[in-house]
Amino acid sequence: MNYKLIVSIAKSLLLARWRQTLIAAIGVTFSIGMFITLLGFMNGLNDLLDGLILNRTAHVRLFQEVKPNPNQPVNASVDYPGAYNFIQSIKSSGGRLDIYNSAAIMRAIREDQRVLGFAPRITTPVLYNSGVVDINGAINGIDVVAENELFFFNDYVTTGAAIDLKNVANSIVLGKGVADKLLAELGDMIQVTTSKGELLSLKVVGYFQSGIQEFDKVQSYTSIATAQKLMGKSNSYVTDIQIKLKDIDQAPAVAKEYAALFQTDAEDIQTANSQFETGSFVRTLISYVVGITLLIVAGFGIYNILNMMIYEKMDSIAILKATGFSGKDVKRIFLGIALSIGLFGGFLGLILGLSLSLLIDQIPFNTAALPTIKTYPVNYDLVYYVIGIVFSIVTTFFAGYFPARKASKIDPVVIIRGK
């Protein structure tokens, strides 16, 4: 078998109908380019939306939930043995909101090799005092250094510096929505009142903007020490411990283990964001379906072009078979033509997809809701490019296989006799 001769014949057939060959290659190029551009852009948007939620969400959260006590005193009474009591509207027990023995728990978490890091937090409802009007809200007392390392807190502080919460006593970073309601500027003093009537003046050192407007109208941040002072609690008072793991998939198992070990409530990120993850999966699935559809359409175009080429080259095929070329040789020639179109068009498609992705990445994207985002997000994952080139080869192979099989079965005697 002379492969060099087969390649030479395939090349001659390609160049003889170079316009059709070019159109087929352009179809593959366009399909691969749009496939990569679409996936990169759609998954870039997914990453942006995921980041708004997941970057600010702990993999495992430990907390104390207020629960009603099902064991009412009448149940324990010896005066009514074997009796039934019917009590409705069971109220919550007088449990504590802070995590008991939080210092020992944090030491144990720090020694766990599965844990990337953790950040303690205090959450308390407050009233922001604006003249004679009180605005409902919430203050989060945070460890600024840990929040920056694990939850990128500084990226969401659009004005001022997050570290000022640690360096400036009695300071606060206001949510942008809260700041607009209070007409508060940097350096201003605002007053907040806790649910127990405690009043404290705080200095505004920054604005926080998460991209979720309703969140920014309520939430503000102080240091843990300031939050403890606001609530009149000791320095061991912590209401939440937010944990990030090295492997997010371990979150459900770790949450269950910690809940039993530390006798606290625990919530994992998969449970907390199950609906959000479903939406992200559906968006990604749609982008893949649309991209693959483009490739299949291009494959039909190549199939039609090769089919027409076979009808036009009946004489050439008959001569090849009459001079000793087998059906397999003819099949290899037309498969070689199809794969050549797929490879050439596929590599040009990779270049086109990358170029369009880079272009989109430079388009300004300015919105007040996402101040940290300056251009449209694009994901340059190498997987998209690998999928693109593999699909171009596979699609063009099958597009060329059936016409090649038809060409290999042509009877040269019938063709020559007909001429």
Image (tube, helix red, strand yellow):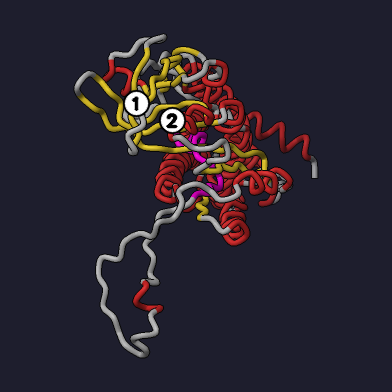
> Crowding near pointer 1: few (<14 within 10 Å), some, many (20+)?
many
In this orientation, does residue 17 appear? no
At horizontal 73% and vertical 46% (from top left) the residue drawn is 111
Mark 1 and mark 2: Cα distance apart in space: 9 Å
- Mark 1 vs 2, N-terminal side: 1
Query: Would you say residue 61 sits in the magenta stretch?
Result: yes
Residue 171 screen position, x and y as percent: 46, 19
- The residue pinned by badge 1 equals 192
Residue toward you, 273 or 112:
112
Question: Which residues are drawn in magenta?
Answer: 50-63
Residue toward you, 147 or 363:
147
Residue 238 screen position, x and y as percent: 53, 41
At horizontal 50% and vertical 49% (from top left) the residue drawn is 63
Q: Secondary structure at mark 1?
A: strand
Residue at the bottom extreme?
A: 82
Q: Is residue 216 left or right of residue 380?
A: left
Q: Amino acid at mark 2?
A: Leu
Q: Amino acid at mark 1?
A: Val
Residue toward you, 370 or 230:
230
> Crowding near pointer 2: few (<14 within 10 Å), some, many (20+)?
many
- Mark 1–mark 2 contact, CB under 8 Å? yes
At horizontal 26% and vertical 73% (from top left) the residue drawn is 87
Q: Quadrant of residue 196?
A: top left
Query: Would you say residue 182 sits in the magenta stretch?
Result: no
Question: From the image, which quarter does the N terminus lie in?
Answer: top right
- The residue pinned by badge 2 equals 230
Q: Secondary structure at mark 2?
A: helix
Q: Quadrant of residue 139?
A: top left
